[in-house]
Amino acid sequence: MNNDSLRRLRLVCGIVLSIALVVAGVCLMTACLGIYLGGGDQIFTPEKVAHGFSVIAVPVYLCLALVLAAFVLDFFLPLQKQKLKAEKDPAVTLDRLLAKRDVDSCDSALKAQILSLRKNRSRDKIITLAVLGVCSIGFLFYGANPANFHQSEINSSMAKAVMILLGCLAVPFGCAIGTAYRAKSSLQKEIELVKQIPISETAAPAPKADRTKLLVIARWALVCVAVAVLVYGFFAGGTADVLTKAKNICTECVGLG
């Protein structure tokens, strides 16, 4: 199957899956509303929820089957990779240049400049991580202190906590932006320096990690962990706790009851 046919098939599957998701969502909201309007001393009981779900089981299970089919389609019928344009990322350009040059055998002064640029980039990353850690720990200590939250002034206490949180987020975010800007400038300078090194026929290619494979492994690892946690929660009786909390929120917190 060529790429054009795959694109058309993916488009049709996407449209069908979108419609199925909308239908399943409407059915779930309708079932919840029907249970609530049914009233009674206890509205969201397991029996009422089970009966309400039995009515909409077909579209919900059909939607889940379509989602699973979409994953299978993407796994077994991937789109063929097309020829991409040259990367404009300085890091990729630098890796390509280093693959044909031997930095260790170049001029000592040039090598010192290159190592200095790399050292500065590593230092900036460490500083940014340190700032993020300090801000995160500081806010955690602030939030864990009950004295910062007065019951008589809960609104002002929460507003103050939000302002502190924004500050704790803004500082490392600003540092990250500055670090990224300096890293890009540093990489461009190193590219110009590396270009001055003669091409070596004996230079070994720079090791490159297969990021795509690592990303796929990380995704599947997260999926496995999520499934394991869901299964554990189900057998540990977590569904009953979730149902009780949802019932309390609906009937007490937001005033539906």
Image (cartoon, rainbow, N blue to C red):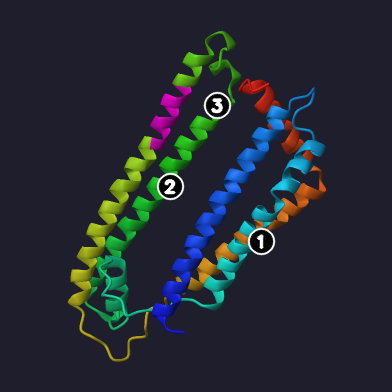
Q: Most prominent secondary structure in the magenta stretch?
A: helix
Which numbered dot is residue 129?
2
Earlier sequence position, callout 3 versus callout 1? 3
Mark 3–mark 1 Cα distance, whole angstroms, equals 32 Å
Pointer 3 and pointer 1: residues touching (CB < 8 Å)? no
- Residue picked out by circle 1: 224
Residue 170 counted in the magenta span: no
Q: Secondary structure at mark 3?
A: helix
Image side of residue 196 versus residue 175, left or right: left
Q: Is residue 209 visible?
A: no
Residue at 55% from the left image edge and 26% from the top image edge: 143
Q: Secondary structure at mark 1?
A: helix
Residue stretch in magenta: 160-169
Mark 1–mark 2 Cα distance, whole angstroms, equals 29 Å
**Neighbour tally class for label 3: few under 14, some 14-19, many 20 plus, Cα within 10 Å:** some
Residue at 57% from the left image edge and 50% from the top image edge: 23
Task: Indicate which label's residue lies in the foreground, 1 or 2.
Answer: 1
Residue 164 counted in the magenta span: yes
Mark 2–mark 3 Cα distance, whole angstroms, equals 21 Å
Image side of residue 95 versus residue 244, left or right: left
Task: Indicate which label's residue lies in the foreground, 3 or 1.
Answer: 1
Q: Secondary structure at mark 2?
A: helix
Amino acid type shown at disc 2: Leu
Give whichever of 72, 197 is nearer the camera. 72
Q: Is residue 70 above or below residue 176?
A: below
Amino acid type shown at disc 3: Gly
- Residue picked out by circle 3: 143
Image side of residue 13 versus residue 207, left or right: right
Amino acid type shown at disc 1: Cys
